[in-house]
Amino acid sequence: MHRFLVGVAFAIFALAVQAAPEKVQDEMGQFMAERGLLQRIGDAGMQLEARASELVVNAMGFLGVPYRRGGNTVETGFDCSGFVRAIYEQTAGLILPRKADQQAAATEKISRNELKPGDLVFFNTMRRAFSHVGIYIGNGKFIHAPKPGAEVRVEDMSMSYWSKRFDGARRVAADAGSTTETN
């Protein structure tokens, strides 16, 4: 119930900021607006950015959900790729492949300096390329399901552990939902 309420609060906050970003006075609103997490919807060209903001806000609603290897629902818990897949399916209606390396292969390669909220960030955590994935939220931070015994959380990509293991960034195309990979 708590996660649901947090998600609803973020969604309401997102709508308020999108409607009047110049009037955001509180620190959280300012933080999110400055980092491009919430964008004003003005024309069709900005719809993808708005969708990315919605994706990030939705992902934040799952903070604290436990890690579970092979997990892909809030009820069972998430592993990294299950979390990313669930967020994209629930928010954007796009079905990504189940495994992190498959998600990397199915998305568009971008450079680190092109990262925008909603993009995917990949890491080599198991001595193989693209063995871990998270969702970039802006300001050098990402949200992910890290490991057994942990919960969905936000981390800084500049931390030594993540910096040494960064494997690349990818952008999900609006038409990425054509895959039907289920496991």
Image (cartoon, rainbow, N blue to C red):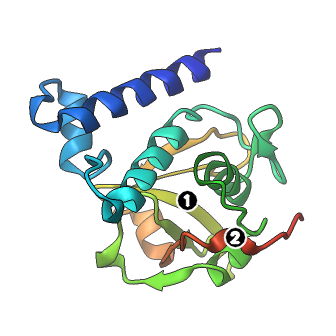
Under tag 1, what secondary structure? strand
- Circle number at residue 100: 2
Rendered location of residue 136, percent (x, y): 43, 59
Rendered location of residue 59, percent (x, y): 54, 43
* 61 to the left or right of 84: left
Residue drawn at x 45%, y 74% is: 164
**Earlier sequence position, callout 1 versus callout 2:** 2
The residue that label 1 is drawn on is: 134
Q: Can residue 129 be seen in this view?
A: no
Q: Quadrant of the C terminus?
A: bottom right
Rendered location of residue 125, percent (x, y): 63, 70
Quote the CA–CA distance across marks 1 and 2. Answer: 9 Å
Residue drawn at x 64%, y 72% is: 176
| Residue projecting furthest to the front | 43
Question: How many numbered markers are drawn?
Answer: 2
- Circle number at residue 159: none
Residue 50 lies, with reference to residue 6, above or below; the image says below
Residue drawn at x 55%, y 34% is: 63
What amino acid is at disc 2? Answer: Ala
- Image quarter of residue 98: bottom right
Give whichever of 144, 84 is nearer the camera.
Answer: 84
Rendered location of residue 6, percent (x, y): 50, 22
* 64 to the left or right of 140: right
Residue 55 lies, with reference to residue 3, above or below; the image says below
Q: Residues within 10 Å of mark 1 (few under 14, many from 20)?
A: many
Residue drawn at x 66%, y 60% is: 94
* 97 to the left or right of 46: right
- Image quarter of residue 49: bottom left
Q: Can residue 36 be seen in this view?
A: yes
